[in-house]
Image (cartoon, grey):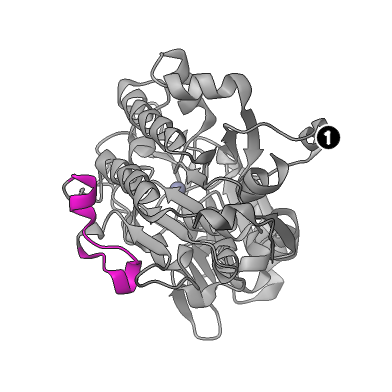
Amino acid sequence: MEGNFKLKRIVNVNDREYKWPVKPLAVICIDGSEPEYIERAIQAGQMPFTAQLLNTGIDLRVDCVIPSFTNPNNVSIVTGCPPSMHGICGNFFYDPHAESEVMMNDPKYMHVPTIFAAFEKEGAKILVVTAKDKLRKLLGHGLTFGSGGSICVSAEKADIASLEENGCEDLLNLTGLPLPNVYSADLSEFVFASGLALLENAKPDLIYLSTTDYIQHKFAPGTEGANRFYNMMDGYWSKLSASGADLVLTADHGMSAKHDSKGNPDVIYLQDSLDAWLGVGVARVILPITDPYVAHHGALGSFATIYISNELEVLPTISKLKDLNGILEVLGKNEACERFDLPSDRIGDIVIISEDRKVLGINPGHHDFSGLDVPLRSHGGLSEQVVPLISNKTFKTEAIKDTKLKNFDAFHLGLNLT
Ligand SMILES: [Zn+2]
């Protein structure tokens, strides 16, 4: 495997050339990491390794893709391109012809290969560890597993990982940790413990570690719960670096408080208004944050798309939506796809984004708040678009600082620009 690092190969994928890594490169996607989390944890002395790293490395604030949700951004990072190219723009979309809502967590909905699949074809070994299993198949799409192959595994299903399906087994023994609960900080810790053990064990060339935002949904930046979590991550990053990996740290999206002064979710229910204006059955609201794991956000985010069966009603509805209190942006499909690089076949006639403290809902009966044991914090909108892009490497040239990098340039940064 060491021989790989000596060759100066170039890998071409999704309209970009990537240089072969000189050392193993670990890109870490910290789910829901509003920049203030790291800033406050460093101020509190909880991230000594990262504080030191920032003295000589790279510390940027960049945009994530909109909607600022987990899957569109993770897929953007691992393909190096926006949703208009790779096709994943939420957890599900509406197919108006089939009149059904379609889950988008199957790799068959991805239009392009990942950076990993392209590198593997050239002989690289890939290591991917994700917190929740929902992302595993998307991230590992096109990889080859089995003895000596790549590795793609989730912390959630670590106990049933197999050589055949995941490229590794026996992770509980390897990490010395018990199987974590899916709603816990331990789930993310397991990602790092696995990444560290497998870095030493399997000698990968490219590494991708993706956490869960369970902590960020519950704790604001600078709080004890948040700082403890960032302290845990800082310790693992230090160990990954000591084991010889270069690091690029970024996030899939930020996170904002989305509640009123009494601590109740501050929701704009769209379906009720639309039904009152247009009659029942004309408009359909899709909340692409909805997934099988809604306990910590109640399927409430700041981005929605709306399908309208009568196209004459689209423009009048856009102007009515703009008048609702708490709405930041209402765009027609073409305008939204152009501005946010979205795939037009998976977006409704209207895209709507709420102000930072508000979320968009269907109607009161649709959302279950029983899993919310703290006031709602969520994401999806423009207020959660700015994320960190940090590396222990340094830029090659000053000119690069003028490039408008995004979070999905993480591998480009780590392989080409440093
Ligand atoms: Zn996320």
Left or right: where 7 falls relative to 203:
right
| Residue 79 image offset from top left, x and y in percent | 60, 61
Q: Nearer the viewer, residue 294 or 126?
A: 126
Furthest residue toward bottom: 98
Residue 314 left/right relative to 301: right
Residue 300 seen in this snapshot:
yes
In the picture, measured across the screen, residue 59 lies left or right of residue 213, that is: right
Q: What residue is shown at x 71% (from left), y 33% (from top)?
A: 395
Please state which amino acid type lies under the numbered disc 1: Ala
Pinpoint residue 62: horizontal percent, then vertical percent.
Answer: 65, 38
Mark 1 secondary-structure assignment: helix
Query: Image point 16% across, 47% down: which residue?
Result: 178
Q: Which residues are magenta?
A: 160-177
Q: Where residue 16 sits in the image (x, y, percent)?
A: 73, 60
Q: Does residue 291 appear in the picture of this structure?
A: no
Vertical comparison of 33 with 371: above or below: above
Residue 261, x across and y down, in percent? 39, 26
Nearer the observer, 166 or 43: 166
Left or right: 368 in relation to 28: left
| The image quarter in which residue 239 lies | top left
Placement of 414 over or under 357, stated as above or below: below
The residue indicated by pointer 1 is 399
Q: Is residue 288 magenta?
A: no
Depth check: give the residue in front, 150 or 45.
150
